[in-house]
Amino acid sequence: MYIVLFGAPGAGKGTQASYVAQQMNLVHIATGDLFRQAIEQGTELGMQAKSDMEKGLLGPNELTIKMVMERMAVPDCETGVVFDGFPRNLGQAETLDEALEKQGKAVDNAVYIKVAEEELLKRLTGRWVCRKCQQPYHETESPPKIQGKCDKCGGELYQRPDDNIETIKNRLGVYFKETAPLIDYYTKAGKLVEVDGVGGIDEVGRRIIEGLRK
Ligand code: AP5
Ligand code: MG
Ligand code: ZN
């Protein structure tokens, strides 16, 4: 199974992708996480993506696609993947379709997690993320059991540098212009699963799994 999770910044892609991957035994590929890892490790890829990320802009398509294809070449991906934050524009969506088609595979469903703008701001400004495994937490909505520490791996929690109001606004602008057209793209392909992303984290997770089963 190949599933795409998309939605605005803060919609809950990372939170739900981690849950769906676990429930459905899929590999979780998050392009934002891969870019952040590359920045942390100071690789060439990281250097190239850093300034775009800091501004809230998309990194170059070519670089993003190359990074995803390399990850997908690892044998653990053969049984299926849940993509988080990829594809992010029509070019990436078409490239993913072509790449899967070459292997006799296809995107099964694209889940659009729908959340209103006001709520997104609240979520992003209260978010803390694990430096090691990138699991997201929220000050009030989903606090870690021990303050400052990841429940999953014990890693240190930090606030992402792009989670400031100015950059969040840029990210939202980019989302509406570049990523929102994917709603149409996957609707036309008969693959869209729209899920209301407001409600408890567990509740939204159940809606996604149910939507995928239909
Ligand atoms: P990326 O890391 O993908 O960031 P994003 O799209 O802005 O999305 P977020 O990770 O901020 O939000 P999310 O939907 O994952 O929400 P989360 O689950 O954490 O991309 C960052 C940058 O990398 C881009 O700007 C770009 O530069 C680059 N990039 C990445 N992919 C790219 C690509 N394909 N092409 C080019 N460039 C790319 O949840 C948010 C918060 O809400 C958390 O605190 C969480 O605990 C809380 N929460 C979650 N669900 C709920 C709920 N139901 N109720 C209440 N709170 C909730
Ligand atoms: Mg995320
Ligand atoms: Zn962790």
Image (tube, helix red, strand yellow):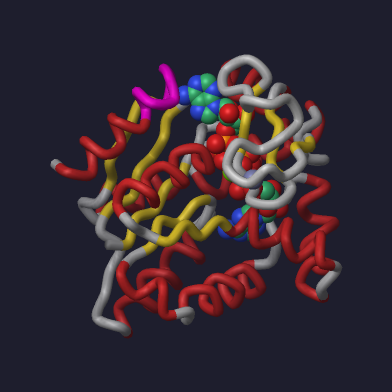
Residue placed most toward the observer, 1 or 100:
1
| Residue 95 in which image quadrant | bottom left
Residue placed most toward the observer, 209 or 143:
143
Residue ID at (63%, 46%): 153
Q: Residue furthest left?
A: 214
Relative horizontal placement of residue 176, taking residue 37 as reference (left or right): left
Q: Which contiguous range is marked in magenta?
A: 197-204
**Magenta span includes 48:** no
In percent of width and height, residue 185 lies at 35, 53
Residue ID at (66%, 73%): 63
| Residue 62 in which image quadrant | bottom right
Relative height, residue 150 to residue 140 (above, below): below
Residue placed most toward the observer, 130 or 166:
130
Number of marks: 0
- Location of ligand 1 given as a quarter of the image: top right
In percent of width and height, residue 121 lies at 66, 22
- Looking at the rendered image, the quarter that the N terminus falls into is bottom left
Relative horizontal placement of residue 202, taking residue 88 as reference (left or right): left
| Residue 211 in which image quadrant | top left
**Magenta span includes 202:** yes
Relative horizontal placement of residue 152, taking residue 197 as reference (left or right): right
In percent of width and height, residue 186 lies at 32, 51
Relative horizontal placement of residue 98, taking residue 133 as reference (left or right): left
- Looking at the rendered image, the quarter that the C terminus falls into is top left
Relative height, residue 104 to residue 124 (above, below): below
Residue ID at (39%, 51%): 21
Q: Tell me if I can see residue 180 in this picture.
A: yes
Residue placed most toward the observer, 89 or 108:
108
In percent of width and height, residue 210 lies at 21, 35
